[in-house]
Amino acid sequence: MFMRKLVLSAIAALGLISAAPAQDYPNKPVTIILPLAAGSGLDIIARIYAEKLQEALGKPVIVENRPGAALMLATQMVATAPPDGYTLLVATSSALAINPVLYKQINYDPANGFIPISLYLKSPFILVVNPDLPAKNVRELIALAKQRTDLNYSSPGAGVAQHLSMEFMKNRFGLEISHVPYRNTPQSILDIASGHVQLGFVEAGASLSLIKDGKLRPLAVSSAAPLPILPDVPPFSEASGAKDFEAVSWHTLLAPAGTPRPIIDRLHNEMKRIMADPTVKERIANLGLVPTDTPSVEGISAYLAEERTKWGALVRKLGLEGTQ
């Protein structure tokens, strides 16, 4: 009986010790590490919610840009940070679902190195074609691609999300469309408008002016929900009849694995409240992105696992595993 009480006392003491940091959180500034440069959509949105998170927490919330190594510099930095809730990471599908298979070596564990806090938006692509292409909608494009062998599409490079989104479409519908990789996003889009290539999945922010000028014809968006900034362009799943089709990147806020759950829960709840603000949602939508109501922490983990499986399998099928 004495030993049982001693063990129970020890367990209770450990619980109090682990809970103490959460009760006192935060007592110093919180830093959000971003894998892209200042001025990017990822950066703009993080600064929007960082300001509101600072008001809620009562301590400074600092946004720090650490671009480099195909988004992996920042990811590795946070993976090795103390799991105390003071160093957080904004990550996308590239860092957590594509790069782990695409690259020969990464210095973090995408599955077990982090605990998710919030999945707050999805970043869809727009399927666009050159206006001279005789395809006015997705079904016509699919039919055309099955008849012709000379169609090609552009992307900013092998293994990027735009490339994989098109390959995902090709694989789903049994299409043969040649890939023309470029070194940067603007040129890959301009060459669709000029007719050097016929089509591609493109970012909204980089293509909207060309769409409005009639130099690109939008056929669909790759998300399950319409893009608020282009409400008349249907989701690909609706336009094609493939109800489960979705090919998007996403923004998720994470902490290092081992961060106390009370801290994760507090941050999750604060982010859920902040991202539900109509003003915040409107600012996200105006950037050509789709705000989402974050799932639970466990729901995010399940979604990220599905995305790792989905994109990892495609990278392997394309023969790109370990090519970077």
Image: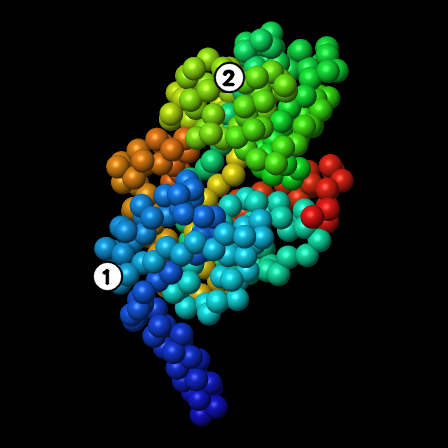
The structure residue drawn at horizontal position 46% and vertical position 44%, both measured from the top left corner, is: 251
The structure residue drawn at horizontal position 37% and vertical position 55%, both measured from the top left corner, is: 63
Q: Is residue 95 above or below residue 282?
A: below
Closest to the observer, 264 or 177:
177
| Residue 50 visible here | yes
Residue 180 x %, y %: 67, 28
Q: Image quadrant of residue 286?
A: top left
Q: Image quadrant of residue 14?
A: bottom left
Residue found at the far bottom of this picture: 2
In the image: residue 178, left or right of residue 2:
right
Instruction: Name the residue that disc number 2 marks.
Output: 216
In the rendered structure, find residue 58 and report the number of the disc placed on it.
1
Callout 1: SS: loop
Residue 17 x %, y %: 38, 78
The structure residue drawn at horizontal position 47% and vertical position 36%, both measured from the top left corner, is: 123
The amino acid beneath tag 1 is: Gly
